[in-house]
Amino acid sequence: MRQSLGETRSSVGTRHALICPDSHERTTLPGWPGSQIIILASPQIGAKFVEYFVEMAPGTKAGAPAAGIERFFFVLEGEAALSLDGENHAMTVEGYAFLPAGKAHTISSAAGAKLAVIERHYVRLEGTAGPKPLVNNARNLPVARLKGDDRLPLQKLLPEDLAFDCEVNIMGFEPGASLHYVETHFMEHGLVMLDGGGVYRLDNSWYSVSAGDFIWMGPFCPQWFGAIGRTNARYLIYKNWNRTPFES
Amino acid sequence: MRQSLGETRSSVGTRHALICPDSHERTTLPGWPGSQIIILASPQIGAKFVEYFVEMAPGTKAGAPAAGIERFFFVLEGEAALSLDGENHAMTVEGYAFLPAGKAHTISSAAGAKLAVIERHYVRLEGTAGPKPLVNNARNLPVARLKGDDRLPLQKLLPEDLAFDCEVNIMGFEPGASLHYVETHFMEHGLVMLDGGGVYRLDNSWYSVSAGDFIWMGPFCPQWFGAIGRTNARYLIYKNWNRTPFES
Amino acid sequence: MRQSLGETRSSVGTRHALICPDSHERTTLPGWPGSQIIILASPQIGAKFVEYFVEMAPGTKAGAPAAGIERFFFVLEGEAALSLDGENHAMTVEGYAFLPAGKAHTISSAAGAKLAVIERHYVRLEGTAGPKPLVNNARNLPVARLKGDDRLPLQKLLPEDLAFDCEVNIMGFEPGASLHYVETHFMEHGLVMLDGGGVYRLDNSWYSVSAGDFIWMGPFCPQWFGAIGRTNARYLIYKNWNRTPFES
Amino acid sequence: MRQSLGETRSSVGTRHALICPDSHERTTLPGWPGSQIIILASPQIGAKFVEYFVEMAPGTKAGAPAAGIERFFFVLEGEAALSLDGENHAMTVEGYAFLPAGKAHTISSAAGAKLAVIERHYVRLEGTAGPKPLVNNARNLPVARLKGDDRLPLQKLLPEDLAFDCEVNIMGFEPGASLHYVETHFMEHGLVMLDGGGVYRLDNSWYSVSAGDFIWMGPFCPQWFGAIGRTNARYLIYKNWNRTPFES
Amino acid sequence: MRQSLGETRSSVGTRHALICPDSHERTTLPGWPGSQIIILASPQIGAKFVEYFVEMAPGTKAGAPAAGIERFFFVLEGEAALSLDGENHAMTVEGYAFLPAGKAHTISSAAGAKLAVIERHYVRLEGTAGPKPLVNNARNLPVARLKGDDRLPLQKLLPEDLAFDCEVNIMGFEPGASLHYVETHFMEHGLVMLDGGGVYRLDNSWYSVSAGDFIWMGPFCPQWFGAIGRTNARYLIYKNWNRTPFES
Amino acid sequence: MRQSLGETRSSVGTRHALICPDSHERTTLPGWPGSQIIILASPQIGAKFVEYFVEMAPGTKAGAPAAGIERFFFVLEGEAALSLDGENHAMTVEGYAFLPAGKAHTISSAAGAKLAVIERHYVRLEGTAGPKPLVNNARNLPVARLKGDDRLPLQKLLPEDLAFDCEVNIMGFEPGASLHYVETHFMEHGLVMLDGGGVYRLDNSWYSVSAGDFIWMGPFCPQWFGAIGRTNARYLIYKNWNRTPFES
Amino acid sequence: MRQSLGETRSSVGTRHALICPDSHERTTLPGWPGSQIIILASPQIGAKFVEYFVEMAPGTKAGAPAAGIERFFFVLEGEAALSLDGENHAMTVEGYAFLPAGKAHTISSAAGAKLAVIERHYVRLEGTAGPKPLVNNARNLPVARLKGDDRLPLQKLLPEDLAFDCEVNIMGFEPGASLHYVETHFMEHGLVMLDGGGVYRLDNSWYSVSAGDFIWMGPFCPQWFGAIGRTNARYLIYKNWNRTPFES
Amino acid sequence: MRQSLGETRSSVGTRHALICPDSHERTTLPGWPGSQIIILASPQIGAKFVEYFVEMAPGTKAGAPAAGIERFFFVLEGEAALSLDGENHAMTVEGYAFLPAGKAHTISSAAGAKLAVIERHYVRLEGTAGPKPLVNNARNLPVARLKGDDRLPLQKLLPEDLAFDCEVNIMGFEPGASLHYVETHFMEHGLVMLDGGGVYRLDNSWYSVSAGDFIWMGPFCPQWFGAIGRTNARYLIYKNWNRTPFES
């Protein structure tokens, strides 16, 4: 499909948004000197979290976010390094880290990298300590099956632990596989299509989506996905978790 | 009607939502260990209250909600027990309880139960004490008639007392009976269809509803119901009450 | 509901129309000297038939329609007389007659009457003779039950005979009764609400209807009715019948 | 236009609402014991003020609203009395009063009355004292002409004084007169049609309105009115005023 | 309102159209050599008639339309002459003529003129002769009152005679006057606003209209007009008439 | 998904329709005595052909359609027999026949059967003879691949021959396979889902479809399908063919 | 903009359509053996003409259309030859020909070509002979200016002669130039974008269009174009002409 | 385009608004005694800033806004003077000033002026001092090219310095030039068209805009502009900048 001026595949609604590469506007942010930032979701769209792509130029780095804000990041392209508690972690594609709120750290890239970053105000569960930092690579993770369906590989990137107020998963769909039903729930999502594509129903709209697309699903947005294509569809998905609606 | 993938009877709008069993997404909550929770309405949808179904597995229990939050619950299926002020109340279907904000209690189920739970931040009326806890069963309640219409049986589950900032009723409709007019008011509703069904007009949309469906009606949402079917339609309905719009 | 200038309950769509008394425009027609005519459906709205109300002033009369056009009429109010083959039939409320195309006749009213009239180009079935004229009163007809449902009284005003290219029925609904499913079919309908009311779904629109309303349902218009009110809803309904879609 | 079940002339949108008598739901409020209250606009609809009708039963009374809230009321029907600073003001139809926030008073009615009441959190202008109470009758007020148009009589019920953070006017239109253009502004309105009627454009919707209707116009809602009928249209209209958008 | 490129007040729908001067496209037609033609309605929009403006340049003329087509014309500006049966009729503003199908004639203009022309296939009523030609000026016609309303002056430009298959009227509205109800009927209209303006409801759309605008109202289009402004609104309106829906 | 009264999965639009089993209305037709007929598409919906299901009761039969009409039928369930040119063809599931216009034949079923039938006015190509009758079973047909895609099995049920004015194919999709692009063309389709299901985009609407559903795609309706599920989706599809748009 | 499955830039409406290359479905037609045909507009979409692209394979040819149909064609790519009245015309890019109805001819291409072809039933003007055939190349034509605007080059490909019932033009727009106003007229258009692009308003929809796109504009469709880009936008446009609406 | 009563070019949506001169409602504000104020955007429309036109009458003046609010103003017409830190700056057309929050100043006009004013709560970047005041004229500024496109002149009115939490630019477009793609970003805009015009796509709506129009673009509103006309289009545009979404 040839690009025509004034057209975009992106669509922004009340309870959901599809943000496609053809409408990415790069900005700068003080905390990421020298990098290009593409903000995908934020409180301005109705979300309780911020998700963005960072295109780190070779030789750039960044420190921790503001007080009270936890950060998850995932390497989409290139290589980055995470300096944390005096240790330096080399991070390749599908490498990821969780940094609790208030945890000092530095992310750098010698040769350039593209990251997906998720940040939110941490909500502590009464009577529990906060979560610990975590560095890993999704390629090392075991693969479960969503609701026992052999066509739906699932990787959980964060531990199942009440200390965490969110979860981040990689969800896969073999060609022709789909969610079992349209979901409506009070949790919201930030979703990055990693591979393949298919059809996403969001509220009463239907979209064809493919790798590189981002979706924000707000609370109670009816949602369903079916994979179309020769290869597996796969997405990285954030969800708030383990907290009541009063706290979320 | 055969289920087709990607379809749902649920519909989420700006001032109302219909949440049907075909789109229920079960989650867990720290306060209800071992139970499955289906959040039906919450501040995330635009409501000032939280309503949810709890599917208690045999042998599970739960304590009181967070400070400042009052709780009403109603037994839809199975049996539960309420431990309150050192007493243990066995609660069968249509049993219900009101627990004022800050009131310690434990809900447990030996054999499993399904509850509808309503929670909200209590708003005290200046110059009054708060409400007392209450345990009862709707089957013990007298039946009034809404606006004197013999086809509209009405049970009030909470006392008419300015200490309460809400009311919960069971409203019935004989076949062919309906609300007398389309209502618009600043109060909101959470409604669980208990029996039968009919046609609900919400804003400018019309829905066919039946037992198991949940409806959120936001403030000023134009609303009307007529009962279709061989048997009475009956629903459990929450409404904020006894407070000015500035306080609600 | 107080009338406001510029408002009407009528609604005209692509595959259906609701024509309510508040928008009736009376016209005259050469064939009905001295009477007031309210055209409800006609080829101009997309129908293959014409249906209208006639308000006969005392002492007026009318002859047969143009060549090739058959006529059915039904007395809604007052009294009329039908002169046919040299006989004079006194017709009271719910009296009706079927006049085959080309059949000379005169309809007169000494004291005034209101009729519902249906006319269409007759389509002969190859190999059959045309239908015979018929004069009767619906109050004399037996009552069947639609699909065996005791809440759905049904009277067939025309014989089941392939010579007829249409049928006209009176369909009743006890309070809370409804059609069993949403129907879609290639036949069209002209419907006059005689008594009571309820909710009509037509395509994706929902209407509250009551006695005096007229509905045109075009081919394939999804349609469903449920009766709301204290008394039975009852309507007079025309349908093309006994011919293939190529001939209809 | 005959009333049909499930129908209303009321319409509730994002930036405006039309609330008509056919959908009035009467409630009680602790501050108005024995009276019936019809809430017309409130923060729940998106307004920064509360407007309601009070149907005072004979012998009922009410005190001042909560701290920080100013009140305006206007007698629509019957007679009321205002007790203020030790004085008792008899108030007949079109009588009105302004009570500054924190000003003790009692409104009573011996024989019953219907009032329109407007309340809001008062916003003080830095460096000024608050407004003084005011009791008057619109029939005593001079009549100006809006923008010099002789067909547009205008009465200002509150003084032009920076101490006031709102204004309340009675605006009239001779038959065929209209606002000179579609207005868009950041101020909001509560409007009660007192006499006559016409066509109101609100955002992209057009409504036929008449006496007894209430309209909420939210900030920036495009708005225009033209009077249709034999007699003048007249409405009572509230507007926030004299404060910057940051303070409003 | 300043003109912006790409904007128009015109709107074309399924059952109605508003054609405003800002979108007039002038064409030529073989039958009107030297004149500019603005086609306003025609079978291509869904109408059974053709209506157009002719801007006759000085010294131009035109003959009769094709066989079977009757013609009505009305002088909007300038002066024209009608040559008919050997007589020459000078026609000034508001002069008009009716030319039966097949009637030879010539329309000419020495100094230029603007005409509104209506043409349709004539439908003869069985057993009657066709209509006679007619030349007159609306300023000579008596003024009746629509439905006895003193604010609604009405002039009938054609005789009430079954030979005519249409009527053409000039309808007036004093400021604030309106049609008494929303009309729905099987006849269609071509309407030229001559003076003043107001609000036209067509189907579910509302339009502000003023002198120079043209409206096509198709069969069964719900329609209503109210006059806004300092002076009377007045329009020239065509309607098919005196024929059954089967013949129209 | 539980069936609720007044709901249907069927949807009827301007250029397409989805007709689902939940809204099937059975009728009788003179040509099919004793059988139940479900008309799926016909000129009344905007199609140039008629397609219907026939539920043949045991022991029923039918003759040829009217003059000029060709017929294709396909056995969906049960067994039927075709008597043609003195021969009797036993037809089991997926058996089908093409009967040219004017070709005498009898279809009978001893034990009952369900057929899909397609009929249209045959259009002869100038200079060619008409097509010959054809009896076969799809299970005997070779399987090609649409556009060489190994996931898209295709069977052509009629010969590629200019004598035919239409084609009927069985199109298959492996899970996750889809049409390669959204098609827009002047030909129309009648489609019966035989197995599996997926997502159909029709114009700007998206539908989840599954076995038993029927789709009419009118001329130029943008259309696309992707298969979702564990097994192949498969549909029987009619298309007009081999004629110019002037003849179609 | 990356192509996603199930997406298209094409859009088909009631009075207009945009048909883009991404949804082209190639068919065969008996009259063009060996060529691929893309039907762009036809009576099936609501047009009174047929327009299509022909992709002629090397060595293919075609004869004249059916009786009564006139043909215009224009060479978009490659080379074709027209054999007419015993002469052979070599036709290169932007070469075009007009062939009156009934005029025998052969179009062939030795090396392959892409043509735009327009066909319609010719309508003779009473009293005139039909048009003569015409062969030319647009590059040889003079360039006028639309309404005298120096930014709007215009070439008329057919003579201004009442014998022709249509015109075909090439219209150009310098960057930033636009039509002077939104046009509404009873004539329809078929438009092929040859170069550049811009924004097309059609009815109330706005489209970004570029070279290769086709637009059908039905009668009375409001329409406007503005050119965006570095180079001139240029389109080939068909319009019916010189006939009254009764004949068109 | 002639103005019709009740019409406006303004349009107010959820994520954007177009405010045109035809709907300007002038108000007064305490801080601008004697001036007319037209509020264009404010928190009431969903913006995080306030933008307005001030029509200063000769001899009027104004002081600084409330604590914490920074101000930018730009002279559109006439002449003003800025008194700041004891200096008096004469400001002519396209003169502008930036006044940090808390900075005392006086704006006056001897002969009258029209200003565009932008105000917002200043957000300090942790670890930096606030910005300094600035007075300049856009006509003195250098011209860059947006993304190196020679058709897109760009002037930055504020320094690139992290102390600033916003930027204000003048963006130009030669005829036919446009933004390179549809942008979606979390920053919002206030835009005043200074010269020329074109087509603005905002969300899924398209508008023709010209000098004097104001546009609010909320966060994530898809946006694109192309210039139509003989001369350059030029607009003054505000954007929040240099702060994370959590702080904005």
Image (cartoon, coloured by chain):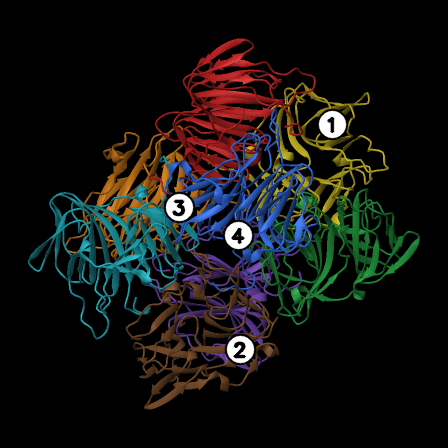
Chain colours: A yellow, B green, C brown, D blue, E cyan, F purple, G orange, H red
Residue depicted at x 53% and y 81%? F60
The residue indicated by pointer 1 is: A91
From the top left corner, tell me how far across and down residue C128 is, in percent: 39, 84
Is there any visible trace of residue F31 in the rendered image?
no
From the top left corner, tell me how far across and down residue D194 is, in percent: 49, 50
Tell which subunit mark 3 falls on.
Answer: G
Q: CA distance from mark 3 to mark 4?
A: 20 Å
From the top left corner, tell me how far across and down residue C66 is, in percent: 30, 76
What is the crowding at mark 4: few (fewer than 14 residues within 10 Å), some, or many (at least 20)? some
Say what secondary structure mark 2 lies in: loop
Mark 1–mark 2 contact, CB under 8 Å? no
Q: Quadrant of residue C45?
A: bottom left
Determine which of the numbered discs, if any, sits on residue F35 in the image: 2
For marks 3 and 4, give the one nearer the viewer. Answer: 3
Determine which of the numbered discs, if any, sits on residue F205 in the image: 4
Residue depicted at x 86% and y 37%? A127
Tell which subunit mark 1 falls on.
Answer: A
Q: CA distance from mark 2 to mark 4?
A: 34 Å
Tell which subunit mark 4 falls on.
Answer: F
Q: Residue flagged by tag 3: what amino acid is it?
A: Asp
Image position of D16 (left or right of C246):
right
From the top left corner, tell me how far across and down residue C196 is, in percent: 54, 72
Q: Residue flagged by tag 2: what amino acid is it?
A: Ser
Q: Residue furthest bottom?
A: C86
Q: CA distance from mark 3 to mark 2?
A: 47 Å
Q: Residue flagged by tag 4: what amino acid is it?
A: Ser
